[in-house]
Amino acid sequence: MSTSFTNEEEEFLKTHRFAALATSRRDGTPQVSLMAYYWDGTNILMSTVNHTAKWKNAERQSNIALVIHDEFAQLTVYGTVECIDQDPLRAELSAATYNYYSTQPKSPHAGRTYEVNAEFIADLDREGRVILRITPAKVLSMLLDY
């Protein structure tokens, strides 16, 4: 089940790049990672590699929380995560995510265009790249003076 966002919340998601992603370790304690993200209008997409704690935690427990902040303004998103490691979906979502990153200043992807092809898929495989697709279920916002 997805939640809807106000216009102000949508704008906040679109104009920020980083979120703190909280997942649960096997023993139930939290694990937090600062991650770049791409808001596609429905889901939050994050590219990661398949040997990280966040990936392993998300495979085991799909409930997550995100915090996107800008000084005193913040958006907290609760939802579920889907671990995507199979093509063609992994490659399609990776290309969309990288192409978004390529429009961002200071990004290692800046100015590049990514297409799904054999070379791109081989690069994803070599790096162990995978996608976390987050479906928001609840949002709490404190967008003071945003």
Image (tube, rainbow, N blue to C red):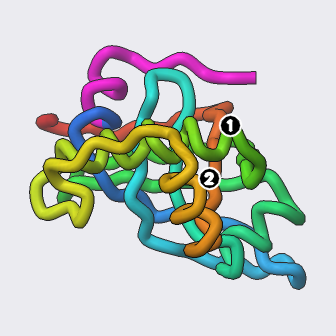
Question: In the displayed structure, does residue 119 sit left or right of residue 53?
Answer: left
Q: Does 22 sit above or below residue 17?
A: below
Query: Disc 1 vs disc 2: which is toward the camera?
Result: 1
Q: Earlier in the sequence, mark 1 or mark 2?
A: 1
- Local crowd size for mark 2, using a 10 Å CA cut-off: few (<14), some (14–19), many (≥20): many
Q: Are marks 1 and 2 in contact (CB under 8 Å)?
A: yes
Q: Which amino acid lies under the numbered mark 1 shown in the image of this protein?
A: Leu
Residue under the image location 34 percent in, 57 percent down: 18
Q: State the residue position of label 1.
A: 89
Residue under the image location 18 percent in, 43 percent down: 103
Residue under the image location 78 percent in, 70 percent down: 57
Q: Which residues are magenta?
A: 1-12
Q: Which amino acid lies under the numbered mark 2 shown in the image of this protein?
A: Ile
For the N terminus, give its image quadrant: top right
| Residue 7 part of the magenta-drawn span | yes
Q: For numbered disc 2, what is the local secondary structure?
A: strand
Q: How many marks?
A: 2
